[in-house]
C-alpha cells in the first residue's frame, strides 16, 4: 500500500501461489480486508491486520473478472462480475457463493 502524501510503502503483502498482475482492488466496509483480483481470474483476500492471505476466491465459471467490489455495509460479501455475463455474491468468510446469476448481462461490467 502506497502512502501518496509521504511517498512511501506503508504495507506490503506476500504474493499468491500463482502470481499474476493485479487488475482490481477493493477494501471491505471495516477496512479489515483487501481483495485483489488478478489477471488470471483469481481473487486473493488479504487480512489488513495480519498482512497474510486469508482466502483465495476461484470462480469455476470464469477466469475473466471484469468488476469486483466489497458490499458497502456487509464486510464479508464480495461482488464479482465476469465477461461471460455472470454476477456472483461471495461470502469470503465461508468462501461460498451467496447468489449466482448466470449470463444476466450481455456486455462486460466495469467498476
Image (cartoon, rainbow, N blue to C red):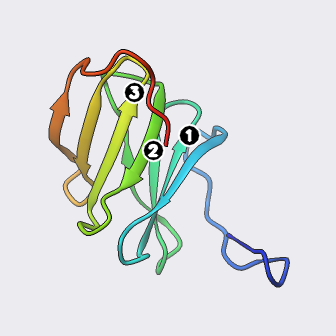
Quadrant of res 105: top left
Q: Earlier in the sequence, mark 1 or mark 3?
A: 1
Relative to residue 16, is residue 58 drawn left or right? left
Question: Which residue is the site of mark 2?
Answer: 43
Mark 1 element type: strand
Q: CA distance from mark 1 to mark 3?
A: 13 Å
First-in-chain label (3 vs 2): 2
**Percent x, y for residue 82?**
40, 27
Question: For the N terminus, which image quadrant?
Answer: bottom right
Q: Are marks 1 and 2 in contact (CB under 8 Å)?
A: yes
Q: CA distance from mark 1 to mark 2?
A: 6 Å
Q: Quadrant of residue 18?
A: top right
Residue ID at (39%, 67%): 28
Write down the residue under mark 3: 82
Residue at 45% from the left image edge and 39% from the top image edge = 67
Q: Categorize mark 2 by other alpha carbons within 10 Å: few (<14), some (14-19), many (20+).
A: many
User: Can you identify the residue that label 1 sits on?
Assistant: 38
Residues 51 and 98: in front is 98
Please provide percent x and percent y for residue 109: 44, 31
Horizontal arrangement in the rendering, residue 87 relative to residue 49 (left or right): left
In this image, 97 relative to 42: left or right?
left
Image-based side of 90 in relation to 107, left or right = left
Q: Which is in the foreground here, disc 1 or disc 3?
A: 3
Disc 3 to disc 2, C-alpha distance: 12 Å
Q: Name the residue at 48% across, 25% down.
A: 64
| Residue 44 drawn above or below residue 80 | below
Residue 30 higher or lower than 75, as above or below: below
> What kind of element bears circle 2?
strand
Callout in the foreground (3, 2): 3
Q: Are marks 1 and 3 in contact (CB under 8 Å)?
A: no
In the current view of this chain or complex, which residue is farthest to the left? 98
Amino acid at each position: 500500500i502506497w502512502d501518496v502524501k509521504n511517498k512511501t510503502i506503508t504495507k506490503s503483502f506476500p504474493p499468491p501461489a500463482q502470481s499474476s498482475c493485479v487488475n482490481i482492488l477493493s477494501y471491505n466496509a471495516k477496512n479489515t480486508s483487501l481483495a485483489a483480483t488478478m489477471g488470471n481470474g483469481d481473487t486473493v483476500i488479504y487480512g489488513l491486520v495480519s498482512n497474510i492471505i486469508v482466502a483465495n476466491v476461484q470462480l469455476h465459471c470464469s477466469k475473466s473478472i471484469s468488476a469486483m467490489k466489497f458490499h458497502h455495509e456487509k464486510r464479508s460479501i464480495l461482488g464479482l462480475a465476469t465477461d461471460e455475463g455472470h454476477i456472483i455474491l461471495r461470502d469470503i468468510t465461508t468462501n461460498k457463493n451467496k447468489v449466482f446469476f448466470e449470463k444476466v448481462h450481455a456486455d462486460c461490467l466495469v467498476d
